[in-house]
Amino acid sequence: DQQVKQNSPSLSVQEGRISILNCDYTNSMFDYFLWYKKYPAEGPTFLISISSIKDKNEDGRFTVFLNKSAKHLSLHIVPSQPGDSAVYFCAAMGNTDKLIFGTGTRLQVFP
Amino acid sequence: DAGVIQSPRHEVTEMGQEVTLRCKLISGHNSLFWYRQTMMRGLELLIYFNNNVPIDDSGMPEDRFSAKMPNASFSTLKIQPSEPRDSAVYFCASSSGTGWETQYFGPGTRLLVL
């Protein structure tokens, strides 16, 4: 039973446009959410996070939005660049301090 | 610093064989995490250690899996006997703090069990 779901396995976006990656969760006890980025043959690297007391967190071109009532979060990348092409994982944690990952979305940014 | 080091990078073995995956933490880090990545389930936390002590092993699939930290900078994940469904990419990560964003992942070991 997947508690963190990324329903889009892949996304293709033109350079300069906005990329929106979505993530849904089922456990209402989750209170901290993270996004990781993964290039081929490398381990995931932390990108951005958000606490459940916020609904938005911004870091440069990356913004994460959290909608607690819908149990939904999204990662916006604007403007998208070819170097952003990677697999993006969303992850969530609650009172167990255990990080639960989604299955990932492969983003391709084309010129 | 070389970052988290994992070996081997690729492993192909036959069903029933023992497999040992190795991980060297970043110097000064005191927490170690083992993850498994599959297409169906994404990244799953298998076990994590803090100061060489296993804190949560509830993600370990079954008794065929075991993990150890013989010293503060090194860990092994052993699968005995291995099965085809164990085929996945196994990552270890280390951190120096309690914040999850401070985890640094190794490049992973791609395991194929025939």
Image: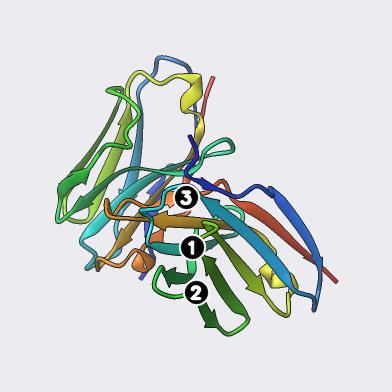
CA gap between label 2 and label 1 equals: 8 Å
Q: Amino acid at mark 3?
A: Phe
| Residue at x 59% of width, y 51% of height | A104
Picture layout, residue B57 above or below residue B13: below
Could you tell which of marks 2 and 1 lies nearer the N-terminus? 2
Indicate the position of residue B30 as horizontal and vertical percent values. 20, 61
Residue B50 visible here: yes
Which comes before the other along the chain, label 1 or label 3? 1
Which chain hosts label 3? A
Disc 2 and disc 1 on one polypeptide chain: yes
How many neighbours does mark 3 have within 10 angstroms: few (below 14), some (14-19), or many (20 or more)?
A: many
Q: Are marks 2 and 1 in contact (CB under 8 Å)?
A: yes
Label 2 and label 3 in one chain = yes
Q: Secondary structure at mark 3?
A: strand
Q: Residue at x 42, y 48 (%)?
A: A27
Quarter of the picture containing the C terminus of chain B is top right
Q: Mark 2 — on which chain does it sit?
A: A
Disc sitting over residue A55 in the figure: 2
Q: Badge 2, how many Cα within 10 Å: few under 14, some, many 20+?
A: few
The answer to which of A52 and A42 lies nearer the viewer is: A52
**Residue at (40% x, 14% y) in the render:** B16
Query: Residue A68, which numbered label?
Result: 1
Quadrant of the rendered image containing residue A82: bottom right
State which mark lies toward you, 1 or 3: 1
Mark 1 neighbour density, 10 Å: few (under 14) some (14–19) many (20 or more): some
Task: Name the residue that disc number 3 marks.
Answer: A101
* Element at label 2: loop
Judging depth in this view, the residue of B53 and B110 nearest the camera is: B53
